[in-house]
Amino acid sequence: MNSPNPTAVAEAPPETPPRRRPIRLPQDRHAIVDSFFRFQSLFGLVAVFVIAIAVSPVRNGESVFLSSGNLANIVRAVSEIGIIAVGMTFVILIGGIDLSVGAVLGLAAVGSATLMVDSGMAIMPTVLIVLFIGTAFGATQGAIVARLGIQSFIVTLAGLQAARGIARMWSGGLGIPIAYGDGPQEAPQAFSMLSGSINGILPVPALLFLAIGVGALLVLRSTAFARHVYAIGGNEKAARLSGVPVRRVRITVFAISGLLAALAGIIHAGQLNQGSPNDGAGYELDAIAAVVIGGTSLAGGSGSMGGTIAGALLLGILNNILALNNIDANVQLVVKGLVIVAAAALQKLRPRIA
Amino acid sequence: MTERPLVRMTGIGKRFGGVHACRDIDLTVRAGEVHALLGENGAGKSTLINVLSGVITEYDGAIELEGRPVSFAGPSDAQRAGIATIHQELDLVAGLSIAENMFLGREPRTRLGTVDIRRMRRQATDHLRALGADLDPRRLVGSLRVGEQQLVEIGRALSLDARVLIMDEPTAALADAEVERLFATIAELRRAGVGIVYISHRMAEIEVVADRVTVLRNGSVAGSVDPKTASRDDIIQLMVGRSVDALFGEGRNEPGDVLLDVHGLAVTPRRPTPGRTEPAGVDLSVRAGEIVGLAGLMGAGRTELLETLFGAGGSGRRAGQVTIDGRPYRPHGPRSALARGVAFVPEDRRGAGLMLEHSVTDNVVLSALSTLTTLGLVRRQAVKRTVAGQLSALAVKAASPAVATATLSGGNQQKVVFAKQLLTRPRLLLLDEPTRGVDIGAKAEIYRLLHQLADTGMAILLASSELPELLSLCDRVVVLHRGRTVAALPRASATQQAILAAANGDDAKETR
C-alpha cells in the first residue's frame, strides 16, 4: 500500500524538456500587456473595423462599408441590443444574468403601440407608462432574487415566459401596426422620429444608445453605487458584512435592466412602426454576447461599460460586413459564435496582477 | 539516526519573475520525526511545501524519496508516492458530504463498480473519530465551521496512509482540545514511522510537537535548531532577523464606562442550521477602552455571538437585552450595526472579509464609502488620501494600493480588513480570530494596534482559540459553553486551566 508507484519515480528526470512559461515581461511592458487585455474589446473593435474596410465591396470607387449611409445603418442596428447590453452589464457585474430582457422589449413594444393606437394616449404618458412597466418588471425579478435567494437565471427565465405571455394577452397575439396621424387609431406623428435621423446622418436610436452608454459609463466609474455593484460581484458575503445594502443594490440593478429593455422596446416599436409580442426574441443572448466580448466576467465583479459598448458595436460591424459580402446568414451565426469564444479565451490569457 | 532520511531535498530554488521565493534550500525529513518549518509569511515555506507536494513542478535542485530521485508531475503523482498534504487554504468541495470529500477521486467501489457509500462513510467516521471529531459523514462540508473543515482535511490526509505528511498550519482554526487530540494523532503517526513536516506560527505548539526546527527567512535557511535546547527568543530572532521584545503589551489605561451590555441574549433560530450554536443565554459587558476575550471550544458559539451582535447572524426570535451606551441596540443587519459604531472583523478573511480579486483601495474604502462621496459620486482624491493614510497607519505592505488584494500576504490581507473596518470609526470592535494564519511579526503589530485602539477608548470583544493570546491581550476573558456564558474571568484569575475547565463545561453549574 505504501510502495511508491513506479511511474511516479522517474529515474532520469533531466530527459523531460523544461516547459517555459509563455509570458514573462519586465514591469513596464507588463502594464502594456495589461491594458491590452483591459481594453481588448476596443482593440477588437478597431481590428474588425480595419478588416471591414479591407474586405468591403467597392461601388463607384468608394467603399460601401465606409459610406455614411452604411455606418448609420450599423449604429442604428446595434442601438437596441446596445441599450439592453448596458443594463445587462450591471446585472452581470453583480454575478447575475437577466434572460427576460428580450421579452420585456416585446412587451414594451406592444405596450407602446396599444397605448397610442388603441387607447389614443399621447407620447409622453405612453413612454412613461411603458418605462414604468419595464422598471417594475425588473424590480420585481430583482426582489425575488434578493428576498428568496433564487438564482437570477431561473427567476428571469420565468420572467421571460411571463413577459411574453402578458404581451400576447395584451395584444391578442397579433402585431399591432402603428399608423401616424391625428385621427382615432393613429399614433402622434412625433413618435415616428425614432425611425429618423438627426441632420439626416445620426439615427435617433443611435443617439439614445450613445447617451445612455456614456451615462452608464460615468455611473460605473465614479459612483458609490457602482462600487457596491462591483463589491457584490466580487464577494457578496464580504460586501454584506461591510455594510453594502446588498438587497437594495440587487433590486436596483434588475430595475435598471428592465427600464433599459423597455426603452429598447419603445425604440423598436418606433423603428418598425408596430408592436408585436414576439419582438425581441433572442435579444437577451445578443446582449450577453456583447457584454462577454466586452470583457466582463460572468462570475461578476469585474468588467467595464466601455467594453460592452465596444462589444455591441463589434457585433454590429461583424454582421454588417458579412451581409455586405453576401455571406449566408447562417454562416454569420457561426462567425459570431467564434468571436464570442475568442473574446472569452483572451480574458483567460490575461495575466493576473493589478 | 543511521538510517537514510525519508525525504532529502537539496538545493531547492524557485523564482517567480525576478523574485527568489526559495534559494538553495536543503531539508531532510527522517522517518518518525516531526520537522517543524518556521518563518514569517513570504519566507518561502509555502513554496518549499508546494515543491515537495508536486504543486510546483519546475524548480532547481533535487528531491530524493528513500534515496531515490523523484520528480512529480503533479499533486496526485506525489500523493501516489506517499506524500500527503494538509493545506492551510482548505480545499474542500462545499457541496459534497464529509465522506465524499475525504475520498474524492479515489472512492471505494462495490463489485458492481458503483461507489461503496457505506464503506466510504464508515471509513470517514473512523478517521474522524481518531481525531476525536464526532461528525456525521453525510453532512455537507459547506455546513461545517472552519475548524470542523480543518478536521475533515486532516482526516483526508490520514486516510491516504501517507509516509510523508505535510501539515501547513493544521491548528489554525482548531480549539485547544482539538489541538491536543491532533497531537495525540501525530504521536501515533510518528510511532508508525511517518515523517511529518509541520508548519505553524504558534511557538508553543512547536515546542511540544517538533523534533527539529528549520527556520526560513527571505527564501533561505536561516538556521536549524533543536527545540529542546533552543529558547523561544532564539527561534524568533532567527525568523525575523532581529529580536522581538515584548510581543505583548503591558500597562494599560483604566477602562471607562460600560459601552456594550448584553443581558440574557438568546436566539431561537427559525430553522436550526446544523453546526451552528446560537447564543443561548449570554451575559457580558465591555467597557470603553477594555479588551474582553471570548473563549470556548469549537462549536461553543463564539462566532455566532459576534455575528448576532453585528446583525449578521441567522434569523430567528431574539430574547434578552443588548444596549450600547445604555440605549437599546437591535441591529437589523451589518448596515445598522455599522451605523451604531459597531465593526466586525470576521474569522474567514478570504470568504467573508475581502474581495480578493479587487484592489486594496476598493477593499479599504468599501465600508466607509458614504463618507467619501458627494451626491453619490466618489471623491477620488479623498479616497486616495484616505487609503494612503490607512495603509501607512497600519503599515500594510503592498506594492501599490492598486494591486489585487490576493497578492498580499496573509498578515497584510488581515490588516486590509482592519483598515476597512476602522475607517468606519467604530466604538465597539468585534474580532473573530484576528490573528489566524498571520505570521508572528504581523501578529505583534496587530496586538500593538489593538492596545492603541483600546487606549483611545474603543471597546474590543475578541474571540480566539489561542489561549495565550487571550490571556496576554485581554482585561477579562468570558467563556462560552454551548451558547451560554459560563465564566467571566478577570485578568488576574484567568489561567489556561481555569478557561479550559469552564470551556469544557466542568462544574459550570456548581460554581455558578
Image (spheres, coloured by chain):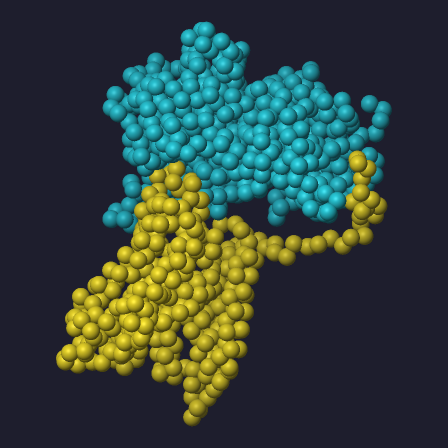
Q: Quadrant of the N terminus of chain A?
A: top right
Which percent across, then down, holds residue A281? Answer: 40, 69
Q: Colour of chain A?
A: yellow
Where in the figure is residue B296, as x and y percent of width and height? 49, 20
What residue lies at 45% left-to-right and 9% top-to-bottom?
A: B509
Q: From the top left corner, tell me how far across and down residue B417 is, in percent.
A: 43, 35
Evaluate whether residue B476 shows in this view: yes
Which residue lies at the image location 40% right of the left edge and 27% below the top edge?
B306
Which chain is in cyan here? B
Q: Residue furthest bottom?
A: A60
In the displayed structure, does residue B423 sit left or right of residue A192? right
Q: Nearer the viewer, residue A135 or A118?
A: A118
Q: In this rendering, does residue A212 appear at all?
A: no
Q: Is residue A330 above or below residue B160?
A: below
Within the image, what quadrant is residue A123 found in?
Answer: bottom left
At 53% across and 73% down in the image, what residue appears? A334
On screen, B301 above or below A235? above
> What residue appears at the point 72 percent right and 43 percent down from the top-left corner?
B110
**Residue A254 position (above or below residue B250):** below
Front residue (pair B250, A336): A336
How many labels were placed on the picture?
A: 0
